[in-house]
Structure formats: structure tokens, C-alpha cells
Image (cartoon, helix red, strand yellow):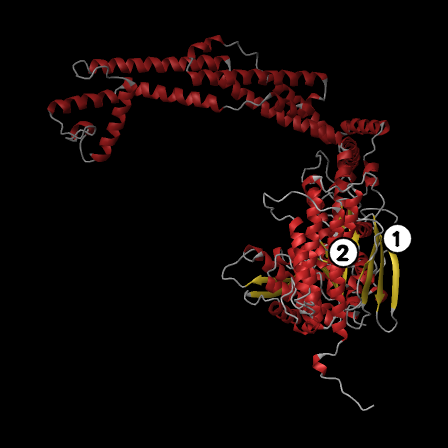
Amino acid sequence: MAFDELLNWSTQDGRPLWQRDALRRIAFSGELTDDDLADLKRLVEKHAGLIEDDMPLPEPLEAAHLSDDSTETPRTILGSIGPVRNVDRLANDQPPLRFATNGVTLIYGANASGKSGYCRIAKELCAAHSKQSLRGNAYDENEGTPPEIDLSFGLSGDTPETRNLTWQQGSPPPSELARISVFDTACARVYVDSERRINFLPYELDLLNKLGICCKAFDRTYQQREEQINADIRAQLPAGFQDATAVSQALVKLVPQSPLAELPTAENLRALGIWTDEKQQELEGLEAEIATEPAVQLRVRQNASTNLESFAGEIEELVGSLGDEAITSFLQQRQAMVDKASAAETAAQSLAEDLPIPDIGGDAWRLMLVYAREFAVEIFADRDEPRLATGETCVLCQQALDDAAEKRMRAFDAFVGERAATESARATSDFNAKCEAIRSLRVRPRTEVESLLDGFAGLSEGRRALTSLVTNFYAQLSARHEALKALINEERYEAFEGFDPLPESPEEVIRTEIEILGVEIEALEEQGQDEGRLQRLNAARAELLDQKRLSEVLDTVLQRRDRLEERLRILDCRSQCRSDPVTRQITARRRVIMTQSLKSALDDELKALKLKHLPLDMSDRGQAGESIVEVSLAAQRQIRKNSEILSEGEQRALALSCFLAELNEVGSEHGIIVDDPVSSLDHTRMEAVAKRLAEEAAGGRQVIIFTHNILFHSMMQSEARKAGVSCHYEWMTSLGGEMFGVIDEAHKPWQMKKPPQRVQEVREEFAALKRDGYDPGNVDHRPKVVLLYGAMRETWEKTVEDIIFNGVVQRFKPEIQTLRLEQVAFDPNADYPTIFEGMKRCSHYSGHDRAEDLPAELPDEAQIEADIDALNDFVQAARERQRALANAPRYEHGPEPEFLV
């Protein structure tokens, strides 16, 4: 069979069942409907365990489901569409649109005639780039009945058959109709304005292409869900659990890296998170039992002894720095510093009594001299002491020292070296160091002290009282320390006198308690410890504590567990929707089936539609589950869309070229439906399109064309005749803005009607005028009379064109049909006066501007009827002459032979 490769691929490598079911659905209806997509998505999620819905088993693709679009497949022939019911605003139960089984069918309908509604029906039933679901009458308040269409089609082949059926919206169209391809404006947009996604592919690639598109759409949906879950699970789970418990071992698996099989079940977590009064009593009993264990008692006392030893040393140090005596000493030290600075200042001032600079002796001045002495020692190392004065050059101003200056420098040097200045500097340095030492002290906060002594406090009431004593003492030390630092930083030393005295230091009490603990520790050490039993008790307590903690945060934990499971199942869905295997298969098969032939076919179509002036290039590739054929301009710089530089007509012609080129790949005999193929085309390309479509019909393809262009309609007739194929006509119109899609030859365009039909319509209009009470004296009737005589005038002209000159030269047709000259029946002596008078009468009343002196009278009924009869008589007489000429001997046959009687 032609599709063994597709069937083999669909069953190999564990192909997901939903994809095989999707291929079957596409093979059956040509497209995946919204219902199909919903069913397939449920299959994916059912397999991954995301849902538990009861649903039918998937039905994989099999050989019986495939339609072969090759030339060996029976050709589908569309027989008719209609009557239709509940489709847009189309009139219900109109006669069907009938299509010729061979040649061309032309359906003419002006704008707003309902033609687009029938095109949408064709796109819904047949193969089209852009399906459009049918809808009921949007203006009908009672809309609700689904669209319904009667149709017929035939199958050619060894056993021809005809099928008549009624199709209703929501049911799949007959699969045989998918062999008929539709081209319309939407197809043009696909080809011109976006990447060229090939839907008219060979049957096998078409199935794979649509499967790949479905895979991508599903994967995008699941990716969005996965990203949302990833954002949700970034938050940390509640903490406070202990190692090695059943709860912590379950919680450690609640991470994205855990496979589904290792995730704890919700039932397991709920069981671990049950907390009852009985468990609370068990926990309290364990804690009491643990508290009485010798090993626990030993550790509590050992820790308490260590901490108390630390507190005793700290308190001794802190009291030495922050106690009442320390504060007194600190203030005395500062006063000494002040006194020594004052003495040094007095000595300096006496030294500088005769100097020009006043107030010598301050701290800054002394510090300057100290640095100057040190600098002089460095630069005048070979000079005698004092180098500040013996260096011959002042180290401050860099000027030579005269005798007076040298004398002053010696005096300054002696001053700096004297006791007053030295002691002042030392006192200042010591006081600053003391201030820094106070700032850098660390006093434990109350909470830290309580935490470290918690075990000790639990040993007895007395020890709890000692813990409070130590804690309160630390609190007072901390308050004094903060106050001292603030006063030192602000240099408000006078406020130091206002401190409340510290209570008695608990250091001695602590050391006494340390000795008592030492005795207790020795006794417990001699008693011996059962470490194994203690471990068991602690493990049981840890399990209960974690279960209690889990019961408090169970909802959060369960939500995390469910989100992790959902994420894993979504990852399973994404693995089922990977499009790269489809892309690889499309690429492999496309290279075998179509690429080179499609390029060649496109080149031929570009020539036929006169587009070879465009530097076009074609390339193909597989991308994310799709087969893409790009038709782009070979421009010197990159452009995003062909439509950026192509004219609208060139876009349309290019789109039709691509359509016809791809169409050859699905077989040369399958039908096509084309909607307004010449929009925006010039006369030359319009003629080229008509010729190409006639050629397709001549090749055996059923060609159905919807158009509103009279010129193209005429061109199509001519090209069909030249190609030797039949041309069937259907006419569509609307009535009064209320009925659309009215199918009736009597309502074909006025331009297309023959003279006898026109005469009949003129009579009907005249009859309606009489029924309205025609009065030649009533000027309100003038517009209708003008229209009536205008129609007669155009009928006289059409009679000359069609009958007198036998269509030798016709409007909307470029050629002159010289073979029709033999039936031209014009008698200048008889016909010219009749035509002249008839046209004159019509022109008199058909809207021409009238001379001011002519009366405004209208013809009476008898005159109108006489004018119509004159037109009709001339038409009938001219046709009789035309028929007589048709039966006359033809020139090309020569004279008739004569025989002896």
C-alpha cells in the first residue's frame, strides 16, 4: 500500500496512542476539530494520570482509515451543495448549486449576494488552509438550530457511485471531500504574509504536518502549566523537623528531583500528621522520663557548670570595667588627664611670653612639636641633640635658623621633653584607650543568658532563682554599658555622677554553685549511664515532635506534594507531545516525495501567471513538527514579509501560483474550488489566471469558480471554449437586503441577459407600473419611466451586439469572433430606421437632459406598450433571420453539388 511507511512509523518506538488516534481523525476529516482536540488532550492526560475520567479507548490509525490522494484513488466529484438551512443569512431551501462533473462551473454573485456563505460551506466540507466553522443567522433572535446542508458527490473509478446526504454542523464532513482543495483570500494571506505552512501537501505529509501542529499546541499548554508550578514550589517548606525521623525522611523527597514512584503518598503524609491527645500524653511522658535519666542529668549539670564558669569570669571582668569602683576610677583618670594637660599648657604659656604668636601650649601645638622632633631625628641623623635646633634649617618652615630662632627651638625641644608635657600626653593616651576598651566590651543580652542557663534553671527552684539573679545582673550591666558608651561618645562626663549603684555581684554565689555541681557530677559519673536507652528515648521523642510539627503544617505539605505530582504528570504529558520525532519523519519523507518537483511546478506557475520578473526563491525545512516551504524574494537585504514590497496584485498572483504548484503534488485529477481568484489583478494577469484554470479543467480536474467580476466571467468562458471544455453557469443574488444566496438564473446580472430575457423583464416592470396606478400627468412616476426606457435603450444596444452582429464584437471580451460574421443579419434599409427610431424614443425618456422648451409630459400606457412591442418585434424578427442564416449553406463548404434527375 502507498502508506506502509506512515503506518510503520505510527507504530514504532512506542508512539503515543493519542498520536495514532489523532492521525486517524485527521485521515477521516482532514482537520482536527475543537472536539477532536479536547478528546485527544484528555487521552494525553488520562495516560499521564492527570485525570481519571472514564473515556473510550483510543482508536489507532489503520490502513482502512487512509485515503489515497494519488491518481489511482477514485476521484471525488462534487455534484451539488444545497439546499442549505440555518447558514449565515442565506435563504433556506433555495435550489442547489449544481456543478458540472467535467469542465468549469462559474458561480456569479455580486458583492453582498451571499456568495461568501457558500464559499465558507465549501471550506468547511473540503480541504482548505483556513477552516471557518459555520454559524447560524446572527440577526435571528431565535438562532439555535445548527447549520444543515444537503449535498451530493460522486466517486469515479472501477465502481462509480453517487452519494446524496444531509450534513449537519458538528458532524465530520465526508472524508472523500478532503480530496477537493479550496483557494480563497485566507489562503493568500497564509502564503504571502507568514511562513509558508504547507497544508496542501501530499496526503502522507499532510497528516504528519497537522499532527506536528497539534503536538506543538499541546506542549505549549503544558509548558505554561509547568512554569506556573515551578514558580509555586520555589517557596521553602516549613522547617523545624529533626533528622532521621519518618517525617523528615518523607519530607526530604518533596523536591522536583524526586521521581513519581518515590514521592510519599498523600495517605502516608496524612497518617504521619495525625496528632491526638494520646500522642501528646506519650510525648509528655517521654520528656519526663528523659529528664530523669542519669545521662541527661549528667549532661545538664556538665553544661551548667561550664556555662556558670564562663559567666563567673565574665562578671568579674565586666564589674572591673563597669562597676561602681571602675566608674570612680574612670572619672579620676579623666580628671588626672585634664590636670596634666592644664599644667603642660601653663608651662608652655610661660615659655612663650615674649613670642609674637599668643596662646602657645595647646594640645595641637604640643603634638606639632612632637612630630617635628621625630622628623628632625630622621633627616638630621648626624647632628647633635637636640636635632630640632642643631640642623641649621627649620623643619617646619624650611628657612635657615638664625641665633634667636635656634634658641627658641632649643627651648621648645626642652619643653616637649619635660615632665609636664610628657605626662599630659601619656594621660591623654591612656584615657582614650580606656574609652575604647569600654566601647568594645560585649555584654551578653538577656535572652542569651536565659538560653544558656535554661537547663540549670530546670534542676531546682533555688537554681531557677539564681538564674534570675544572674540574668537581672547582666541586664543591669548591659544598661550601664549602653549609657556609658553614649556619654563617652557625647563627652558628657559630668553625667557620670548620676549612675545608680550596681547590685552586689553574683560571682561568689556562682562559684559556690559550681562547686556543688562538681560534687553532683562526680556522683552521677560513678553511678554509670545507659546510653542506648537514652538514644531510644530521644528517638521516640523526636518522632513524636516531628509528627506534632507536621500536624501543624499538614495542609501546606500536602499542597506541595500534590503540586509536585502534578508537575511530574505534566512532564509525562510533554514527553507524549514532543514534536521533534514528527519533524524528523516529515523531513525524511519530504525529501523523498516532493521537494524538487514542487520547486519545478512553482517555476512553471510563475511563468504562466507572468511573475518571472520577480526574483523568487523557494526553500524547505522541517521545524518543530511542521513542514515549511518558504517562498521569498531573493532581495539584497533581508525583508520580513513579501507583502512589504509586493503589490496587492502580485501577492494574489503569487498565492495562486503556490496553490496550483502544490496542487499538482496531490494528483492532477482532484477538484478545486476557487473564490474570487482575480481580486486586484490587472487585465493581463486576469486573462492568464483564466487560461490556467481552463487548462486545469482540460486536464480532467473539476474546476469550480466563485466570482463577482463580470470581465473575468467572460474571460473564463472564452478560455474554456479555447481549451475545449464545457462551462456551466450558476447565478446568485440577494433580494431587498433580506434574502441572500438566492439561486435563480432569472436573477443573473442584467449585463449577462439576452435580449428576449430583457424584453420580458421590461414587460414585467411595465405591468408593475400599471398596478401602481400609472398616471402620465404625475411627475412622481418619472423616475420609474426613466428606468424603464433606460432598460429598453440598453436592450436595443444588446440586440445589435448579440443578434444583428451575432456577437462578433462583445463587451468584456477582447477577441473578435470572425467566424460569426456569416450569421450577421443587418439590412441598412430596414434595420437602421427601426433601430434609430426605437433608440430615439428611449433616449427621449431615459434620463437625457431635456431642452427647456420641451413639455415635461410622460408617455401614456399605450405609447409605452407600443414601444415595448416595437422592441420585441424587432428582436424576434432579427432572431428569425439569424436562424435562417444558420441553416444556409456555409461558405467554407462551397456550392452545393448538382445531380442529374
For numbered disc 2, what is the local secondary structure?
helix
Residue in front for this viewpoint, 434 or 879: 879
Say which amino acid is labelled 2: Asp
In the image, what residue occupies the spot 78% across and 27% down?
A: 292
Say which amino acid is labelled 1: Pro
Tell me residue 731's x, y (percent): 76, 57
Q: Residue furthest bottom?
A: 900
Image-based side of 704 in relation to 401, left or right: right
Evaluate if marks 2 and 1 touch, with contact meaning CB atoms under 8 Å apart. no
Tell me residue 810's x, y (percent): 66, 64
Tell me residue 738's x, y (percent): 77, 44
Q: Quadrant of the C terminus?
A: bottom right
Tell me residue 587's x, y (percent): 68, 66
Disc 2 crowd, CA 10 A, few/some/many (<14, 14-19, 20+): some
Which residue is the site of mark 1?
56
Which residue is the site of mark 2?
869
Picture quarter containing residue 228?
top right
Q: Is residue 619 above or below residue 420?
A: below
Which of the labelled discs sits on residue 845, or is there none?
none
**Badge count:** 2
